[in-house]
Image (spheres, rainbow, N blue to C red):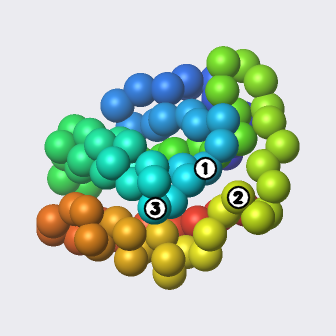
Amino acid sequence: MIDELIRKGEGRKCDFKREFYKLPQDKGELAKDLMAFANSTKQNEPDSIILIGFKNGTFFNVEDSSIIDEAAIQQQIDSLVEPPLDIMAVS
């Protein structure tokens, strides 16, 4: 799946990030990215994806300590975006 995402590249439904957002200080950037996905999604389309640890053709080591738990991420998203967006973290 990751190979296919990389092959297709960034676009309306996929964004690559070198590292995870530093929350809460980067919550504005997270909100901007999520709203861009939400505003460009059509009904019955596959989910949007933010791939962490890859940027400009290079993989980066993402430390476990830089990623907060899924519930905390969902809480940040719920405070930023209306209607709420569901997330799923895959590692």
Please identify the quarter of the rendering in which residue 78 is found: bottom left
Q: What separation in Å lies between label 1 and label 3 (alpha carbons)? A: 12 Å
Dot 2: within a 10 Å radius of its alpha carbon, few (fewer than 14), some, or many (20 or more) residues? few
Residue 19 vs 59, above or below: the answer is below
40 or 31, which is in the foreground?
31
Q: Which mark is residue 24?
A: 3
Q: What separation in Å lies between label 2 and label 1 (alpha carbons)? A: 7 Å
Residue 27 horizontal/vertical position (percent): 39, 54
Whether residues under marks 2 and 3 lie with C-beta atoms below 8 angstroms apart, the answer is no
Q: Residue at image x 15%, y 68%?
A: 83
Horizontally, is 25 left or right of 6 in the view? left
Which quadrant of the rendered structure holds the C terminus?
Answer: bottom right
Residue 33 horizontal/vertical position (percent): 35, 42
Q: Earlier in the sequence, mark 2 or mark 1?
A: 1
Residue 53 vs 73, above or below: the answer is above
Dot 3: within a 10 Å radius of its alpha carbon, few (fewer than 14), some, or many (20 or more) residues? few
Q: Earlier in the sequence, mark 2 or mark 3?
A: 3
3 or 40, which is in the foreground?
40
82 or 21, which is in the foreground?
21
Dot 1: within a 10 Å radius of its alpha carbon, few (fewer than 14), some, or many (20 or more) residues? some
Q: Residue at image x 45%, y 49%?
A: 26
Residue 15 horizontal/vertical position (percent): 49, 35
Whether residues under marks 2 and 1 lie with C-beta atoms below 8 angstroms apart, the answer is yes
Most extreme residue toward the top is 56
- The residue tagged with tag 3: helix, strand or loop? loop
The answer to whether one can see residue 73 in this image is: yes
Q: Which residue is mark 2?
A: 66
Which quadrant of the rendered structure holds the N terminus?
Answer: top right
Q: Residue at image x 45%, y 54%?
A: 25
Q: Which residue is mark 1?
A: 20
